[in-house]
Amino acid sequence: MAPVSPTQRVLSPDDVVDFVRSSFGPDRRVTDCGPLSGGGFAAVWWARLDDGRDVVLKVAPPPTARLLRYEADLLAAEARYFRLVAERAPQVPVPPVLHHGRDRRLGEWLVTGRLPGRALPDLDGDDGPVRADLGAATAALHRITGDRFGYDAGRTGGPTWSAAFAAIIDDLLADAADWAVALPVPPERFRALVARHGELLDTVRRPALLHFDC
């Protein structure tokens, strides 16, 4: 399958076999596999293993890919996210993390279990019950709290929401400069706007876990 973005690596079935063996050992075999659509960052394939498990393989962008600042270490963050939700909100369906690897030859990759289901737009008939379940799952995520705002593991964030939000805006402005994106107003206007409303931002006092793609 051709990549849909410059961050996606082009994989083959032989590559999938290589990643699976590097994750589970040289004796683990792939009986079937294929690409999955819907994403635009990592390369994503499903694979069926000889022990009957269906897994999902995500492969990080190649080292030569240009990334935005928030895209750094996304696969590692995804693994931490799945583990945190499984521990703190077990009623929320997240795939089990089976392996997260880094290798000089292979790069970085993540293997999880594959959850059954269909995409919401593909459902026929009344999707109200599914949307209600989605709302309940999202509410459960929001009850998971932390000790800081923003991204985790030392990435962009801060002790207050105004500080984290300002730092996130600074990253976006730096990305715009790196990529030579013409802004509608000077960067200082964006920073001044955030600073002017810092007190309002800080009415949010509890860091809550979010799902970026939900």
Image: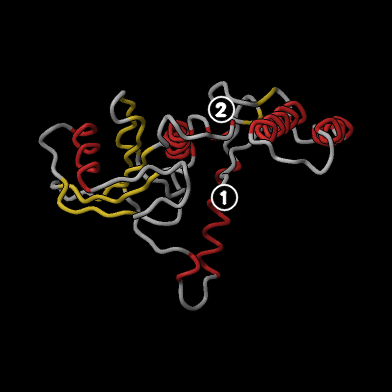
Q: Position of residue 170 (x, y in %)?
A: 72, 29
Name the image quarter holding residue 18: top left
Q: Position of residue 51 (x, y in %)?
A: 14, 46
Camera-near label (1 vs 2) is 2
Q: Amino acid at mark 2?
A: Asp
Q: Position of residue 83 (x, y in %)?
A: 42, 35
Name the residue that disc number 2 marks.
152
Identify whether 172 is placed above or below 41: above
Find residue 138 and name its label. 1
Residue in view at x 57 percent, y 37 percent: 144
Disc 2 residue crowd, few under 14, some 14–19, many 20+, Cα 10 Å: some
Residue in view at x 69 percent, y 32 percent: 177
Q: Amino acid at mark 1?
A: Thr
142 sits to left or right of 78 = right
- N-terminal of the two: label 1 or label 2? 1
Disc 1 residue crowd, few under 14, some 14–19, many 20+, Cα 10 Å: some
Furthest residue in direction left, as rendered: 27
Residue in view at x 19 percent, y 54 percent: 32
